[in-house]
Amino acid sequence: MSNILYPVEYRKKEIVIRKPWYEYLTIGVIGGIVMIMLLITLAIMFAYPYSNDWANRDYYGIAEVVGYSMYPQMYDGEYVLYITTEHPNFDIKVGDIVVYYNEEAGVYVAHRVVDIYSANGVEYVLTKGDNNNYYDEPVRIDEIKAEVVDVIPNDFEKWCYEVWLNLFNWW
């Protein structure tokens, strides 16, 4: 008789090599910095038309649209990017959308400029909402508060513009 050796099952021990805690911290910090840089890059990409105007960012603002007088250009709940009258490139022309304060209603109104004219040595602006059938009361040109430069259709783009406007104001 011969001796037959049967294979013996060996159970391999699982060897677990654990990384030290500081390696996880390093990966997390680097990943966080990369994510922040990516988000800032995306924000600047979305705000590209205005992102080269770093020196004048203090003259920009964001406001929410309420109402349908400028439909289909602006919808209720959208946001607009505007420049104030102090901005060096502020110039009102026929066809621009301007913002003025309506004292009767107690609200700011953003309507399109239809005509600019002078009467008795005072310049006036005639405005009209794109969706309205009537013209607004003429507004003196010095009562114009801002000019709308862009319509922001969603919250992500609004966030991008906010990042661009506040990018280096964090510290």
Image (cartoon, grey):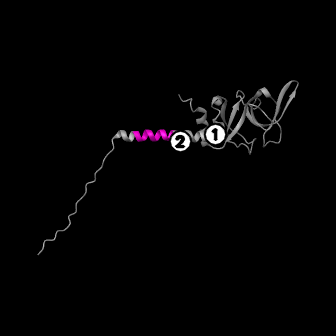
**Which amino acid, by three-letter code, is at mark 1?**
Tyr
**Per the image, is 139 magenta?**
no
Vertical arrangement, residue 86 with respect to residue 131, above or below = above
Q: Is residue 171 left or right of residue 125?
A: left
Using the numbered discs, state the Cα–Cα distance from disc 1 to disc 2 in whole angstroms: 15 Å
| Residue placed under numbered mark 2 in the picture | 38
The residue shown at (38%, 41%) is: 24
**Which span is picked out in magenta?**
26-36
- Residue under the image location 66 percent in, 44 percent down: 153
Residue 27 among those drawn in magenta: yes
Say which label, 1 or 2, has the lower sequence index: 2
Disc number at residue 30? none
> From the viewer's perspective, is 83 left or right of 117?
left
Q: Position of residue 13 (x, y in %)?
A: 25, 54
Three-letter amino acid code at the position of disc 2? Leu
Coordinates of residue 100 in the picture (x, y in percent): 75, 31
Number of other residues with Cα within 10 Å of mark 2, as a class: few under 14, some 14 to 19, many 20 or more: few
Task: Give the structural element (helix, strand or loop) at label 1.
Answer: helix
Residue position marked by numbered label 1 in the rendering:
48
Q: Residue at x 36, y 38 (%)?
A: 22
The vertical placement of 154 against 121, above or below, is below
Q: Residue 44 falls in which quadrant of the image?
A: top right
Furthest residue in direction bottom, as rendered: 1
The foreground one among 97 and 67 is 97
Q: Quadrant of residue 141?
A: top right
**Category of crowding for the residue at label 1, using alpha-carbon neighbours closer than 10 angstroms: few (below 14), some (14–19), many (at least 20):** few
Q: Is residue 54 left or right of residue 16?
A: right
